[in-house]
Image (cartoon, rainbow, N blue to C red):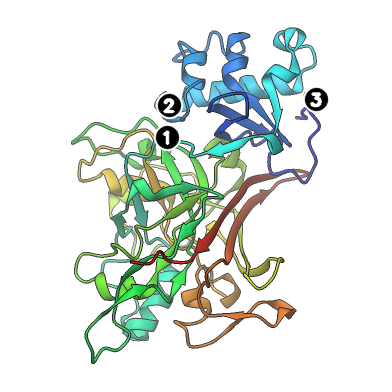
């Protein structure tokens, strides 16, 4: 399938096989739902007025859904509607004789990516972060508890998670201030207050929930998979020193709630379908609600990279090369476990995977691991600059893609800069 409506480079993150959804605005138009294709954005509300989505069961008013400054209403409609809209878009973009193509003014339904401002894709009601990478959990456990007690007894039996702060989730490009808080650098002395000195990134991905479930009604694995709308890149910034002092007994708090950055384009599960792979062997076999009912692989082959642009220079330097396929607990397992208590998930809820680390040092998904808790310097190429953790005014960039035959399914960028802490 080839897009004939606009030119698309083979190296583009957004070919016709992708078609991610996002929320954008221009200097002349308010925020609305769009789809990325090549270097352009399609205005779905404008295409709705031309009848492109007429006749789709379950989508009564495409204009009403797509003119909103969030994707929640569309997410709530479910996979058959998502898939039908995607199919109509692909036919429109690939068929020169499509009836809507015959009447369309391209300038009214299409705008260059370079001329838009991107917004959060959804109104995020609730945000949960998991801890689903065995390599990351093991590395952190070895650092703080020793090799013999690296993984807690529950870790291989359930997807560990905690509830995060939805209000501080921001879209890519939003700068964040270094957080202040309590830390205890000397265990023989009382804690001190001030800016974090061990600020870190966490390489993650995150999924948005679609229709959700009723309170008291858990999802099966199959229902959970159908309920995942799509995936974004995520940097769940972490103040390691603040977190280390505060997290016992209830888990992360100020060390995590100052900011979480997500990429603006939501890549659908249909776009990722060709890139399914087997997830790592789970031993012991999880309980039936986490292991039975589906024959399709639960992993996805998504290459991920993290780069840093230090404040001393203007170039980015590679820090991490990892892959979502290393993740021990699959996305559907995370969502099924989240709901098994009867917790009701809602359209637009966000669930992060936790840091995605791989088996080799260059695939470690955080500076905590790369510097081994600050014991060694991280060299930034031939620049002569080193880091143990993030300095003020450093920029972190996360990218990811799936490589197909002659095309790539990309996620765009997840970028954030750390500004100095505010004086208190």
Residue 18 visible in the displayed image: yes
Residue 268 visible in the displayed image: no
**Label 2–label 1 contact, CB within 8 A:** yes
- Mark nearer the N terminus (2 vs 1): 2
Name the residue beneath numbered marker 3.
4
Give the side of residue 424 with respect to residue 139, left or right.
left
- State the residue at coordinates (53%, 77%): 370
Q: Which mark is residue 78?
A: 2
Q: Which mark is residue 226?
A: 1
Q: CA distance from mark 3 to mark 2?
A: 29 Å
Label 3 or label 2, whichever lies nearer to me, is 3
Q: Secondary structure at mark 2?
A: loop
- State the residue at coordinates (41%, 56%): 259
Locate the C terminus and report the quarter of the image it occupies.
Answer: bottom left
**Label 3–label 2 contact, CB within 8 A:** no
> Residue 31: where, in percent of width, then height?
53, 28
Give the side of residue 50 with respect to residue 55, left or right.
right
């Amino acid at each position: 399938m080839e897009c004939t409506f606009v030119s698309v480079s083979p190296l583009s993150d957004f070919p016709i096989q992708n078609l991610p959804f996002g929320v954008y605005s221009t200097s002349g138009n308010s925020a609305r739902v769009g789809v990325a294709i090549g270097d352009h954005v399609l205005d779905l509300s404008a295409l709705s007025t031309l009848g492109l989505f007429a006749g789709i069961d379950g989508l009564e008013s495409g204009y009403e859904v797509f003119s909103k400054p969030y994707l929640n209403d569309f997410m709530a409609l479910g996979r058959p509607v998502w898939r039908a809209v995607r199919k109509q878009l692909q036919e429109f973009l690939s068929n020169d004789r499509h009836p809507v193509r015959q009447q369309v003014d391209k300038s009214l339904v299409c705008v260059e990516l370079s001329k838009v401002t991107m917004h959060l894709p959804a109104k995020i009601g609730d945000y949960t972060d998991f801890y689903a990478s065995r390599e990351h959990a093991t590395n952190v456990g070895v650092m703080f508890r020793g090799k013999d007690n690296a993984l807690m007894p529950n870790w291989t039996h359930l997807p560990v998670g905690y509830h995060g702060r939805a209000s501080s989730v921001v879209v890519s490009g939003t700068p964040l201030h270094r957080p202040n808080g309590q830390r205890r650098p000397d265990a023989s002395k009382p804690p001190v207050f001030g800016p974090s000195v061990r600020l870190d990134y966490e390489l993650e991905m995150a999924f948005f929930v679609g229709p959700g479930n009723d309170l008291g009604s858990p999802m099966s694995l199959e229902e959970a998979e159908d309920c995942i709308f799509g995936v974004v890149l995520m940097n769940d910034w972490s103040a390691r020193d603040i977190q280390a002092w505060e997290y016992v007994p209830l888990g992360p708090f100020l060390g995590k709630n100052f900011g979480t950055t997500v990429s603006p384009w939501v890549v659908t599960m249909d776009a990722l379908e060709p890139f399914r792979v087997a997830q790592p062997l789970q031993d012991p076999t999880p309980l039936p609600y986490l292991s039975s009912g589906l024959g399709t692989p639960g992993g996805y082959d998504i290459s991920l990279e993290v780069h840093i642009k230090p404040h001393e220079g203007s170039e980015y330097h590679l820090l991490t090369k990892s892959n979502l396929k290393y993740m021990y607990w699959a996305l559907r397992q995370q969502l099924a476990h989240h709901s098994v208590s009867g917790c009701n998930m809602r359209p637009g809820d966000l669930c992060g995977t936790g840091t995605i680390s791989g088996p080799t040092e260059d695939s470690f998904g955080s500076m905590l691991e790369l510097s081994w808790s600050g014991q060694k310097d991280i060299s930034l190429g031939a620049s002569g600059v080193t880091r143990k953790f993030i300095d003020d005014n450093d920029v972190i960039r996360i990218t990811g893609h799936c490589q197909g035959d002659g095309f790539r399914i990309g996620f765009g960028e997840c970028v954030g800069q750390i500004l100095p802490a505010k004086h208190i």
